[in-house]
Image: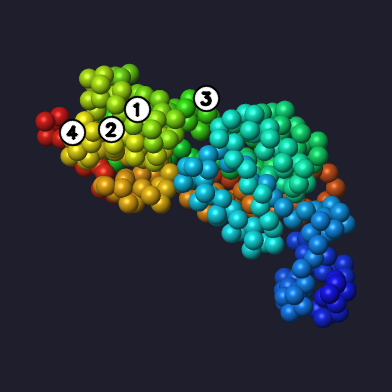
Amino acid sequence: MNIKAVAKLAKVSTATVSRTMNGSAKVSPRTAERVRRAIEELNFYPNTNARALGSGKSSLYGLIISDITNPFFPELVKSFEDIAVAHGQEVLTANTNYDNERMKLCVTRMLQRKVDGVAIMTSEMDDRLVEVFSRRHIPLVFLDTGSPSPGVSCVRIDYSAGIDAAVHHLIALGHRRIAFISGPMRLASARMRYKAFMESAARDHLDDNPKLIAEGNHRVDGGHEAMKRILASGARPTAVLASNDLTAIGAMGAIHEAGLRVPEDISVVGYDDIQLSAFTMPPLTTVSLPRAEIANAAFKALLSVNRNETPGPVHGEEQMIKPKFVKRQSTGPVPRSSR
C-alpha cells in the first residue's frame, strides 16, 4: 500500500495527501478528513523517516521538563501528548532533573531526532543552547522564561495572582503570622513565587520575622526539613504557604511529627494542585495551575509557527495563564491561643 492508493481513494492528489499528513494549513478541514478516512480504510502507515527526508518535517515535537518525579510534570506531559496525538504529532520527552549537563544532553537528543519544535517547560535555559535551536530554525516555546522573539514563544504563569489569593484566604481566617517555604532560589519559577509572597506580605502588613521564611527543594523531603527548621526557630507560624504541593505535603508531615495538627494548630497551603493533593489527610488547600491549559498554549504556539508558510522566521507569541485557588480542609481559622 502506498500514498498513490490513498490519493486515489480520497480523490485527491498525492501532494494533498502529503500536506494532510504534515499538518499543512493549506488543506481544507473537509478534504483533510477525507484523506484521514482513506488512510484508516487502507491501513496506510507511512515511513516517518522517509517522510521526514522528503518534507523536511519529522512530525515530532520535543518536550523538556525539570523533574519527572514531581506529579505536576507527568500531568503536563500527558496533556501535551493528548493534544499532539490529536494533531498527528509525536512527542519526545526529556527530563533535566534541574541539571545543566543533563539539559545539554536533552538538547542533543532533540537535534539528533530533528524535532519540528521544542516546548521547554523548565525554569532555566542556557542562552547558548537557545542559539543552537535558533541556528537550525527550530521554533521554541518557554514556560516563564525569555521573551517572544522570532521563532520563540512564551507561556507565563501569573504567580502573583495565585499567591495573593492564598494569602488573602489565610488573612480572612485571621492569620497574620504566615510562613513561606520557597523552592530552590536558583530557579526562576521559585524566585518568582518568593517575590510574589514577599510583595503580598508587605502589602498586607504580615509579620515580617525572617525566621518564617525557609528554602526548600520543591520536593517532599525539602518541605519536611524546611518546616522543621521553622518550628525549631521558635517563630511558630499559624499558617504556612508552600511554593509547591510536594513541599506542602512534606511540611504537613513535619507538623504532625511535632505533635501539632493541620489545620487546628497550623494551616497549610500548597501550589500546583497535583492530583495527590486532593487525597492527603486532610485534603490540601492549594493554588491550581491548569496543566491542560499550559500544554495547549505551548503546543498551539509551536504549531502556529510551524504552519506559517511565509518566508523568514515568524515572531513568537506570549500567553498568560491564570491560576485558580482551591479551598480544601488543610486551612482553618487562626488558633484561639494565637489571636
> Residue 32: x percent and y percent?
75, 71
Residue at x 52%, y 49% (from the top left corner)? 74
Residue at x 75%, y 61% (from the top left corner)? 23
What's the mark number on residue 225?
A: 1
Nearest to the observer: residue 295 or residue 248: 248
Residue at x 25%, y 25% (from the top left corner)? 231
Left or right: where 24 falls relative to 161: right
Left or right: where 239 falls relative to 19: left
- Give the structural element (helix, strand or loop) at label 1: helix
Q: Which of marks 3 and 2 is nearer the N terminus?
A: 3
Image coloring type:
rainbow
Q: Distance between the residues labelled 4 and 3?
A: 33 Å
Circles 2, 1 touching at the beta carbon (< 8 Å): yes
Where does label 3 land, which residue?
Answer: 186
Where does label 4 land, which residue?
Answer: 259
| Amino acid found under the numbered disc labelled 2 | Ala
Q: How far apart are marks 4 and 1 (CA)?
A: 16 Å
